[in-house]
Image: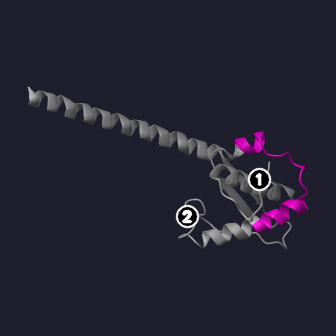
Amino acid sequence: MKTLVYLVLAIGILIGCNTSKTMAAKEDQVAKQEAVSDTVRIANDKLEYEIIIIEPGFNFWLASRAKPEGYYSQQFMENRNMFYVNEWNRRVLNPMRYNPNLYEMQIDYQNHIDYGYDVNYKLYNYFIYFQLTYKQRLAGFIPRI
């Protein structure tokens, strides 16, 4: 009788593990689809730059919670972006202290290049979104919406 109980228990565990694998595969597929739909690409062929932001939820946040375009001046966002980029790059270069999964790549943002309003707007709002979502604080500014 004990053997039968162990056999039934073992079969139950195998079926349970197999079900979780298919659920995990479905969740991975949904996550990949969300990542594709939450990809923001900002490019300007004239200046030869490109920013690709792949962050689940950022598009929705940008459309629903961020201040509308025109609320902040380009100069304000350029100034903040310089502080945020410098701090971001400092954290990328220090993976022992800061989570390398959060700070993966450096951002090449130069203050003498006019990236235009759209790039500065989306980059600034990404930094705000990032700080609020991951409870980080870049450059001493309190993120505001």
Residue range (magenta): 60-83
Which numbered circle lies on residue 100?
Answer: 2
Q: Is residue 4 left or right of residue 142?
A: left
At a point 55% along the width and 60% down the height, the residue shown is 101
Amino acid, disc 2: Pro
Question: 10 Å neighbourhood of mark 2: few (<14), some, or many (≥20)?
Answer: some
Q: x, y percentage for residue 74?
A: 89, 59
Q: x, y percentage for residue 78?
A: 84, 64
The residue that label 1 is drawn on is 125
At a point 76% along the width and 57% down the height, the residue shown is 123
Above/below status of 86 relative to 142: below
Question: 10 Å neighbourhood of mark 1: few (<14), some, or many (≥20)?
Answer: many
At a point 48% along the width and 39% down the height, the residue shown is 27
Q: Is residue 123 left or right of residue 39?
A: right
Label 2, label 1: how far apart the Cα atoms are: 21 Å
Above/below status of 118 relative to 30: below
Q: Is residue 75 magenta?
A: yes
Give the colour scheme shown: one colour
Q: Nearer the viewer, residue 62 or 97?
A: 97
Quarter of the image for residue 137 reads bottom right
Quarter of the image for residue 45 reads bottom right
Which numbered circle lies on residue 7?
Answer: none
Above/below status of 13 relative to 135: above
Q: Nearer the viewer, residue 137 or 44?
A: 137
Regarding residue 115, the answer to whether it shows in the image is: no
Q: x, y percentage for residue 109?
A: 76, 69
The kind of secondary structure element at disc 2 is loop
Amino acid, disc 1: Asn
Quadrant assignment for the N terminus: top left
Q: Is residue 50 magenta?
A: no
